[in-house]
Amino acid sequence: MYTRIGGKIRKAREGKGYSQHELGAALGLTATAINYYEKGKRKVSIEDIFRLAAALKKPVEYFISDVKQLESEKPSLSKNNNPEIIKKLIGIPVLGTIHAGDVLASEQSLLGFLPTPACEAAFALVVKGDSMDGKGVCDGDLVLIRRQDHVDFNGQIVCALISGKETALKIYLREEGKIILRSANPSYTDIVFDSDGSLDIQGVYMGVFKLP
């Protein structure tokens, strides 16, 4: 199964003219990790597929379109990695807006529901601003966020609540004892904290939906 998905990842990467190192850098991964994806040596989770789709500007369906064939090849898949999960759609709440620009108070209100593959503790936000353009997240896009209060790795994109009132979509970095929220657009300055006392991680980026 993963070999077939890996082949699609490689084809999409080469189509964009990216090296494995460049794609890995866009996702906060190493070139070796991308190589393992493409060779089918590493599990591709739903979250991974959303991130790859965003980075390579491909619809999620591109990677999973032949899921029925994959099911017939591996009928003994466990519940946790069964491709059937990907096909089950749920409506996750679109909870308002998040700023990808100058940090301002975000609008928090239920705008509706977004059909998406089943995943726990997820919500969506409408992006305002262009500070994350370098990661393929643009003004007006819908970002899918997994609700959690911690960061999984240095360089992860997070939904951060600053000083209890201002919400931003930024790249989270720890450097020399400081916490840095960085934009993917170099025209924006870093937001630097001496500690995480003023920063509340509300979730981490899972993927982006491009609206027509």
Image (tube, rainbow, N blue to C red):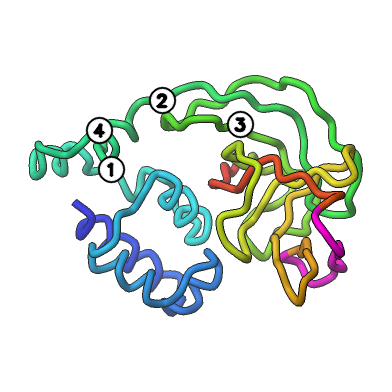
Element class at badge 3: strand
Query: Is 16 on the left or on the right of 109, as rendered?
Result: left
Camera-side residue of 157 and 87: 157
* Marks 2 and 4, the one that precedes in the sequence: 4
Spot occupied by residue 36 in the image (x, y as percentages of width and height): 30, 69
Spot occupied by residue 35 in the image (x, y as percentages of width and height): 32, 73
Tally the numbered discs: 4
Q: CA distance from mark 2 to mark 4?
A: 16 Å
User: Residue flagged by tag 2: what amino acid is it?
Assistant: Leu
Question: Vertical placement of 174 versus 203: above or below?
Answer: below
The magenta stretch spans residue 80: no
Q: Which residue is mark 3?
A: 123
Q: Which residue is mark 2?
A: 89
User: Residue flagged by tag 1: what amino acid is it?
Assistant: Ser
Residue 79 is labelled as: 4
Residue 65 is labelled as: 1
Q: Residues within 10 Å of mark 2 (few under 14, many from 20)?
A: few
Camera-side residue of 32 and 139: 32
Residue at 61% x, 40% y: name it: 148
Camera-near label (2 vs 4) is: 4
Question: Vertical placement of 150 versus 142: above or below?
Answer: below
